[in-house]
Amino acid sequence: MSAPRTRTWWVFGSLSDYQRGWLRPDIIAGLTVWAVLVPEALAYATIAGVPPVVGLYAAVPSLILYAAAGSSRHLIVGPMSATAALSAAMIAPLASGDDTRFVALSVGLAIVTGLVGLLAGFMRLGFIASFISEPVLKGFIVGLALTIIIGQVPKLLGVDKGEGNFFVQAWTVIKELGEVDGPTVVIGLLSLAMVLGVKRWLPLVPGSLLVVLLGITAVALFGLDDRGIDIVGHIDSGLPTMGLPSGVGAEDYLDLVGPAVGVLLIGFAEGLGAAKTYAAKAGYTIDANRELVGLGAANLGSGICSGMVVNGSLSKTAVNGGAGAKSQVSGLVVATLTLLTLLFLTGLFEKLPEATLSAVVIAAVIDLVDFSSLAALYRVWTKRLGSIYGHAARADFAAAVAAMFGVLLFDTLPGLIIGIVVSMLLLLYRVSKPHVAALAKDGTRWVDTSSHPDLRTLDGVVVVRVESGLFFANADHVRDQITGMVTTGTTTVILDAETSPFIDVSAAQMLAQLRDSLARKNVSFRVARDIGQFRDVLSGADEGALKVDVYPTVSQALEGRDNTSA
């Protein structure tokens, strides 16, 4: 009997295998995220320079449309600090001090970001994410999590927040320690301790939701807001205006394309990092192209509903996953509750202490400060520096640290660009310096002597293997490595080409030049076990310049018999 086919849906595809037992944890997770998202959305709208309620306008459509188009079961999409700050910075020069135009352009930026995301997704540009290596992505997430945490600490302590990178903000907090507000610190630290304690010892209890409700209750009962405790404050109620923002023309939309690409890049990186993190924990995979479509649809819907730019949220996804979410039903629950909040419950969150909100955010992202993974990369580097993996291990660790410090020093967008550049350099570095192994015979097999130092090589014979295709970027390196293995007693060099699936003309010319240079030293050069495109290129070479002796096996190359010349 054949195995049942897995259902594949495009719309709400992440719900295609929904299980009834997931409903309760999804509802609990949705309630928990809602308790965090509403006040955060209000705060991030302020960062973006638009009225606080615009953050709520953005949340409802973005949650629904991402659930419909995205591939993650856990990712929560909504307003975020990084894209909010980037939006404000990019809109300010275009608005020329006009507050009404500033809001309209901010909404327009969400629309253009959505269209760019949809176009990128339908053009299947998600492969770009493949060029961001896992170590770089890990470093980026650690840096971003640290940035989120340091941004929340001032509210936790009741001090002024500094402007600048992670280290500037951290130094500002240190300088302000003498000015901390005692009651705010008590509320913040108690909230943080409670959230972390519940997570550790009562994992089935939604600690974040419990702490938020207790904070609101404490303010209401004891009038803490009258005693200097900062709270979220007044929130407008009602539904948004639907459609395109007034006063934004075609030229304005064109001017917003560049900023939209930057916003999309940051949103895609953070969302993809968060989505992959929780997908790995739950045992499913993420489709990068669908993530682009989901992010594009979420931004387009947000803009049409008078909202701001949105992206996948690292912190709220952490809250969602930590609360036990199993699918995007939790996101739909959040959207429903946020809609009800706009209609009836805006007053509820007006009494939420800012310190409690900061504690919930810090508790959510603290697990993502995964220094242990960076330490593991460092241990691999130090243990394998002398082996064939040394260069790769060194590059992985350096790339992760560069991405992390790029975010910490230069903020999210420059940090992401540094990460991407490092990923590309890492890729070029690896392909340009493939491992060239000296081989020795172990029974019927030819194996790498660096892994089998007890085996002896044949006198006068050098057998090598290049663990990569041969092309212009690595041809000189391969030539130098092979030449360096030749000694005064060498009579024959054999290239075992089984692990080189392809070769280009530049590398073929290099082999011919290597053949000629070795011949001048009375050393013969032969190729064995050529496969695939490697064989096709050498077989198609004209007689003369690129002619290299090719043998079916290494043993036959040793004996110099049954060869075909390419």
Image: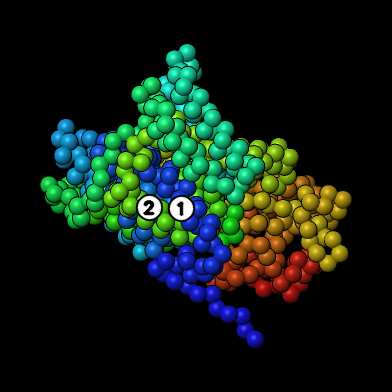
For residue 428, above or below residue 148: below
Would residue 85 appear left or right of 240 to someone viewing this image? Answer: right
Quarter of the figure with residue 448:
bottom right
* Nearer to me, 166 or 161: 161
Question: Residue 337 bears which disc, if any?
Answer: 2
Q: In the shown orientation, is residue 438 left or right of residue 161?
A: right
Which amino acid type is marked by label 1?
Gly
- Left or right of 463? Residue 401 is left
Label whose residue precedes the other's in the sequence (1 or 2): 1
Q: How is the image coloured?
A: rainbow
Which residue lies at the image location 19% right of the left edge and 52% below the top edge?
241
Using the rendered view, name the quadrant where residue 196 is placed.
top right
Q: Residue at x 61, y 47 (%)?
A: 203
Q: Residue at x 75, y 53 (%)?
A: 438
Most extreme residue toward the bottom is 1
- Looking at the image, the residue that sits furthest to the front is 221
Relative image position of residue 162 (x, y in whole percent): 39, 23
For label 2, the crowd category at 10 Å Cα-Cα, with few meaning under 14, some 14 to 19 and many 20 or more, is: many
Q: Nearer the viewer, residue 139 or 357?
A: 357
Please give the label number shown on residue 30.
1
Q: Position of residue 306 (x, y in %)?
A: 23, 49
Is 26 or 170 nearer to us in this picture? Answer: 26
Q: Is residue 346 visible?
A: yes
Percent x, y for residue 232?
Answer: 35, 34
